Amino acid sequence: VQFVESGGGLVQPGGSLRLSCTGSGVPIDAEIMTWHRQVPGKAREWVATLFPGGATFYADSVKGRFTVSRDEAKNTMYLAMDSLQPEDTAVYYCQQHGSTAWGQGTQVTVSS
């Protein structure tokens, strides 16, 4: 089982990005999948959860700005991020709920 994150980059405040999490070895639509982020020197922070039935939950800090979704045909989960702010700068990770494994993450930098 492996997940690969991609789609990060440098964006100006107020901008948007869409992150991808592509899975192999497990059908994403059958698993509880989560997004997390981490700033160097700080604990990893939960961002969002996507349930197999489609229910989604978000951290208060991103609610209304971030949207998690999936494409079953591509076995990929997405995190659409709008109205990005400098405090959203972090390495973003996806994870299968219950797993202890982490991928390499994808860097998001919000700066003017």
Image (cartoon, rainbow, N blue to C red):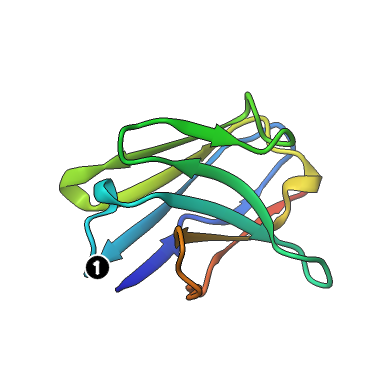
Q: Nearer the viewer, residue 65 or 54?
A: 54
Quadrant containing the N terminus is bottom left
Provide residue 3's location: percent of width, then percent of height. Answer: 37, 67
Q: Residue 15 is drawn in which quadrant?
A: top right
Question: From this viewpoint, is residue 112 visible?
Answer: no
Provide residue 97's location: percent of width, then percent of height. Answer: 45, 58
Residue 55 in the image: above or below residue 23: above
Q: Secondary structure at mark 1?
A: strand
On screen, residue 40 versus residue 79, left or right, reads right
Which amino acid type is marked by label 1?
Ser
Specify the farthest residue to the top.
Answer: 64
Question: From this viewpoint, is residue 20 visible?
Answer: yes
On screen, residue 82 versus residue 5, left or right, reads right
User: Which residue does the image show at 42% across and 51% down from the upper left?
Assistant: 33
On screen, residue 61 versus residue 108, left or right, reads right
Residue 27 in the image: above or below residue 78: below
Q: Residue 45 is drawn in which quadrant?
A: bottom right
Q: Nearer the viewer, residue 101 or 68?
A: 101
Provide residue 44's location: percent of width, then percent of height. Answer: 70, 63
Q: Residue 91 is drawn in which quadrant?
A: bottom right
Residue receiving disc 1: 24
Quadrant containing the C terminus is top right
Residue 71 in the image: above or below residue 53: below
